[in-house]
Image (cartoon, rainbow, N blue to C red):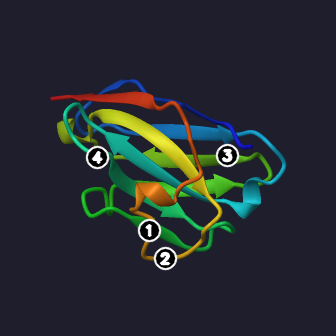
Amino acid sequence: QVQLVESGGELVQAGGSLRLSCAASGRTFSIYAMSWFRQAPGKEREFVAAISRGGGNTYYGDSVKGRFTISRDNAKNTVFLQMSSLKPEDTAVYYCAARRIDRAGTYYNTATYDYWGQGTQVTVSS
């Protein structure tokens, strides 16, 4: 069992930056590929970014490429999402997720994830 707790969400102005963190319980964090998703009111959950178990491979959704960076610290059981050049359309609840599968091409699929956090609210004002 893995518990994920996100933090770092807040109100920020457009053009600003924010860093989200997701802390995982347990001693097997490094066996999970980790991802960030987001969900805005009335919209489906959207893939944001993913990172492989060892951190050597990263993947991004088209809407955040070049602006967001995902990273992880396996020694601290934490995954991060550095967000810059934020836009009002980035406003959403951001979730981190973990899965045992570490296969490129399927990171966007919410059904492949084993664990989810409760989410953290990010609001970008114009």
| Amino acid bearing label 1 | Tyr
Foreground label between 2 and 3 = 2
Foreground label between 4 and 1 = 1
| Amino acid bearing label 2 | Ala
Q: Distance of mark 1 from mark 2, alpha carbons?
A: 8 Å
Foreground label between 4 and 3 = 3
Mark before the other along the chain sequence, 2 or 3: 3
What's the residue at 54%, 48% (across, down)?
97
| Amino acid bearing label 3 | Thr
Answer with left or right where residue 99 lies relative to residue 74.
Answer: left
Mark before the other along the chain sequence, 1 or 2: 1
Quarter of the rendering containing residue 72 = bottom right
Q: Distance of mark 4 from mark 1, alpha carbons?
A: 18 Å
Q: Distance of mark 2 from mark 3, alpha carbons?
A: 21 Å
- Residue at which label 1 appears: 59
Answer whether labels 4 and 3 touch (C-beta < 8 Å). no
- Residue at which label 2 appears: 104
- Residue at which label 3 appears: 78
Q: Distance of mark 1 from mark 3, alpha carbons?
A: 17 Å
Image coordinates of residue 119 in percent, x first then y, are: 47, 32
* Quadrant for the C terminus in the image: top left
- Residue at which label 4 appears: 85
Position of 52 relative to 95 (above/below): below
What's the residue at 43%, 55% (across, down)?
110
Question: Helix or strand or loop: what does disc 3 sit on?
Answer: strand
Mark before the other along the chain sequence, 4 or 3: 3
What's the residue at 74%, 53% (across, down)?
29
